[in-house]
Amino acid sequence: MASAEQAYYIGTDMNCGGACLLKAYIKDGVITRMETDDGNEPQLRNCLRCRAYRQRIYAPDRLLYPMKRIGERGEGKFKRITWDEALETVASEYKRVSETYGPSAVIYLTNGGDMGQVHNTRTIVRLFSLAGGCTLMWGIASNEGWMFACQATYGYPAGVDHRDVINSNLAIIWGMNPVVIIDGCGTSYHLALAKEAGTKFIVVDPRFSDTAALLADQWIPIKPGTDAAALIAMAYVMITEDLYDKKFLDTYTFGFDRYKQYVLGDEDGVPKTPEWAERITGIPARTIADLAREYATTKPAALLPSKSPGRTAYGEQYHRAAFTLSAMTGNIGIHGGSPGCEITQRGDTPRPMGLAMRTGGNPVDAGSPRRKDALPTAISKGPGLIARLHNTEVMDAILEGKAGGYYSDYKMIYTANVNYLNQYPNVNKAVKALKSLEFIAIQEQFMTSTAKFADILLPVCTFFERNDAVWGAGPHLAYQRKVIEPLGESRSHLDICDALAEKMGITDYNDKTEEEWLEQIMAPAVEDYERFKETGVEKYVGEPSVPFKNEIADPANFPFPTPSGKIEIYSQQIGEIETPLMPAIPKYIETWESVNDPLVEKYPIQMISTHFKRRAHSQFDNIPWLRELELQAAKINPRDAEPRGIKSGDPVRVFNDRGEIIIPAEVTQRIIPGVIDVPQGAWYDPDERGVDRGGCANVLTRDTRSPGGAMPSNTCLVQVEKA
Ligand SMILES: Nc1nc2c(c(=O)[nH]1)N[C@H]1C(S)=C(S)[C@@H](COP(=O)(O)OP(=O)(O)OC[C@H]3O[C@@H](n4cnc5c(=O)[nH]c(N)nc54)[C@H](O)[C@@H]3O)O[C@H]1N2
Ligand SMILES: Nc1nc2c(c(=O)[nH]1)N[C@H]1C(S)=C(S)[C@@H](COP(=O)(O)OP(=O)(O)OC[C@H]3O[C@@H](n4cnc5c(=O)[nH]c(N)nc54)[C@H](O)[C@@H]3O)O[C@H]1N2
Ligand SMILES: [Mo]
């Protein structure tokens, strides 16, 4: 007999940071349709990607069985095998490689994927830690430049609560596009409420983004990678026109005088005037001066810089320059202000939770010396270890090993929750590196560009096929109810780890079931755990949080956790490791591959790679409903397109010394001349000449990091020609 249709609210999660609330209808063990939160305000509505998730779950190309490679690496030819054989192979390869070369020869690669409380990357770190260790990565692809800047300046990272922007009289949205990238569920809704309530919005972005279209009273276009210069020139205007908050600086900050000397040119003979910045940024000097005056004289005002301009060659300088301006205007620690940080769900969350599993301490980390250029007070010590590989240098390390100055020689990788080949710089180098390894195991849901290089493929299920919980920016906590059985032979993340632990002979890996873990984490975090499971969500409706509120209201009892106990405009920690490329005060440093690089003769166009509406990175690129929405195209200004004979829809070659892609052009006034946007995340799809027809931006990006650890994917010169 057919069962009745049932509906459940489910917290979503796929590496966009949204964690919004979906309503799934289930009949006879199948999801029949999906809607979004239609419950109490504030509703946590999904965007188009989650609303199309049904096609992702039931996609014909989902990986449903363990497989082993039968063709060449990268060819994508596989044969179905049993779980037993798959796990046995991974366990014995780990043993062989770690015994032959040492455990650091095994790299565990991971990133976003899903970020539940139970099924997450820690489970594998724990597994390999107990087995003897492995090499881990450091560097958050999204915002390591910001993390570094926060730790140096404030001592810890903090984000703005989107519900507080309504209290701002002026919001400066700097390189941020929440209408598309969500930035925590409900952000664009709260910004729209602020707009209706009279907040003025200024958007600084090389593109007339959807956010600019929706919110901006003024759009200020800027050349990529030059943001620090604009912010520093704004400081110049405030200083020379006496428009800054000296009392705030005296009370709460350290080292402003040194910054002032630099800004005025006492230090290097170059006053950082708006005219100086105009030549660098392309923003007219008058616009910079007006923006400085408006920001300095409107209170409260929120400078809201996103991470994207920080994903440039010296990205941390932009963040530190933004923090300094926020201090100069006294906008830190008050409602409607901002410390110059992005809007983030990692603001003052009402009831923070821990991820479930303790990693147990990774022996490879434990044996590692620290990097000289790591900040001593960084909260997480892992990133400061020499044994860790920066996320942009993994493939170089595989190719070069100890001979190239790396900590180890690398022979095996295990990946989960990452599509490394596609999402990290210099795909062509990565192809070579992956071909050179002895063993590759990939835990995946789809035959991604990275999965094609696997020796063993382990199919992992989606969050609809197991129980978990997520934590979101509503702010809210949401339950992820298992509403259908895992498809095919796919298994949950924790199940795979449990089974692998058994094969590896690790008996003390995990003493709890999924449900026990969940109850342990969630029961203390919610009012009534059973009700939470039933309703699927707990929403918080209190006052918006204010980052650094205590430090500003009561500095004697709440010093900033920096060496001086203050906001360090001059960072003493950076001062101790100072190199010209990592100055102790924020400075403008011209990027490599800038418009003044001699390379512009060959490659005159700056490429940025934005986060795309119809994907979460590479996830959803294969979903037909979403593909209908927008073409993967190189977005180019008519002034660059016309002399090249390029019209919208024409296939164009976008290339540099690192590689070449061919995709259609989209000729648009919505991007400034001299810049193209190739939205990141399209699936790498090389033709017989090795030219990528999928339009993967990372075929072109450079595999290196900023001194502070940012992944500089928005620093990249290319040429564009009609194909
Ligand atoms: N050029 C350029 N490159 C970029 C960026 C850029 O701006 N420009 N942005 C960078 C940023 S900020 C980030 S965060 C990274 C993202 O980089 P990734 O995290 O590698 O990107 P995803 O495409 O989300 O890849 C996650 C993969 O994990 C798989 N997966 C495995 N297990 C699970 C699971 O349990 N659940 C889910 N949902 N998926 C699973 C998914 O199928 C998918 O293939 O990309 C970075 N790369
Ligand atoms: N739809 C969708 N949403 C996502 C993701 C996704 O892949 N798809 N990924 C999620 C993740 S993990 C992350 S980290 C975030 C990323 O969030 P962001 O980093 O904020 O996203 P981007 O689209 O890279 O950039 C935002 C804006 O910055 C502009 N920009 C680029 N370079 C510069 C520059 O040098 N200066 C200035 N001023 N502006 C610049 C771009 O034109 C764009 O409009 O998005 C999250 N949300
Ligand atoms: Mo990210």
Image: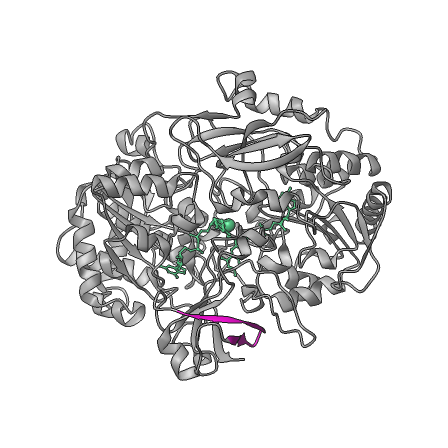
Q: Is residue 573 left or right of residue 130?
A: left
Q: Residue at x 79, y 55 (%)?
A: 455
Quarter of the figure with the C terminus: bottom right
How far across and how far down the image is residue 497, in percent? 74, 37
Quarter of the figure with the N terminus: top right
Residue 219 visible: yes
Q: Residue at x 62, y 64 (%)?
A: 684
Residue stretch rendered in magenta on the structure: 651-667
Residue 562 visible: no
Name the residue nearer the viewer: 660 or 713.
Answer: 660
Vertical placement of residue 155 versus 662, above or below: above
Q: Quadrant of residue 394?
A: bottom right
Vertical placement of residue 44 versus 282, above or below: above
How far across and how far down the image is residue 227, in percent? 34, 61
Check residue 666 for magenta coloring.
yes
Q: Is residue 410 left or right of residue 69?
A: left
How far across and how far down the image is residue 234, in percent? 23, 58
Q: Is residue 281 left or right of residue 454?
A: left
Check residue 157 for magenta coloring.
no
Name the residue nearer the viewer: 134 or 635.
Answer: 635
Q: Quadrant of residue 591?
A: bottom left
